[in-house]
Amino acid sequence: MDRRDFIKSTCSAACACIGVSAVSLLQSCEDNKAYEQNVDGEDFDTQLSIDISQSPHQNLESIGGTSVLSPNSIDSLGLLLVRSSADNINAFSRRCTHSSYSVNAFNSEGLAVCSSGHGGSFNTSGNVAVSPPSARLTSYNTSLINNTLTISK
Ligand code: FES
């Protein structure tokens, strides 16, 4: 192999490596773009509605009544619902602010006890009733029109 052939074959190999790297880099960028579209896109539901006159939510027709929703598009651990006034229902995440275990439905004493066994609980305002949690439950925006409760994030 003379000098010219050596340079020609070396350059071809180098160009092939650069081409493969560039394709990988572009594919990586495409993956990130797709992820961002999924995170910020419109495919994810940002609100849900329930009819509080229907089972199992009729307790919400009375002030002080509570109900619970299983995991959904608003919150992956579900929601605690509390009728706070004639025209408002509060919606709280069921994610405990201590270590992210699920919080149970409100009991007859108006406490939502964490399922972890750590002893934490929250009152119907979403505030810590018993530690170790130190922060209140996350709350979501709600609107109540007639019997339709809409919860959004
Ligand atoms: S995770 Fe709820 S009290 Fe620890």
Image: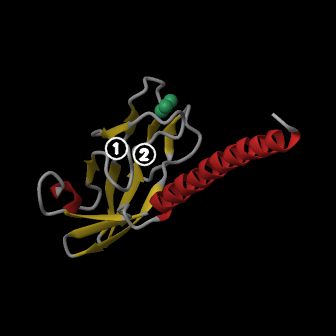
Image point 60% across, 55% down: which residue?
26
Q: How is the image coloured?
A: secondary structure
Residue 60: image location, x then y, percent? 23, 59
- For badge 1, the amino acid type reads Gly
Up/down of 122 relative to 115, above or below = below
* Residue lying farthest to the top in this orientation: 117
Which residue position holds label 2? 123
State which tag comes first along the sequence, 1 or 2.
1
Q: Quadrant of residue 133?
A: top right
Image point 46% across, 27% down: which residue?
119
- Closest to the observer, 81 or 129: 81
Up/down of 109 relative to 93, above or below = above
Disc 1 packing (10 Å; few <14; some 14–19; many ≥20): some
- For badge 2, the amino acid type reads Asn
Residue 100: image location, x then y, percent? 49, 36
The reply to whether dot 1 and dot 2 touch (C-beta < 8 Å) is yes
- Closest to the observer, 70 or 137: 70
Q: Quote the CA–CA distance across marks 1 and 2.
A: 6 Å
Q: Quadrant of residue 61?
A: bottom left
* Residue lying farthest to the front in this orientation: 2
Residue 107: image location, x then y, percent? 29, 38
Image point 26% across, 55% down: which residue?
65
* SS for callout 1: loop
- Closest to the observer, 25 or 49: 25
- Quadrant (top left/top right/bottom left/bottom right) for the C terminus: bottom left
Which residue position holds label 1? 110
Residue 149: image location, x then y, percent? 27, 67
Instruction: Give me the disc on residue 19.
Output: none
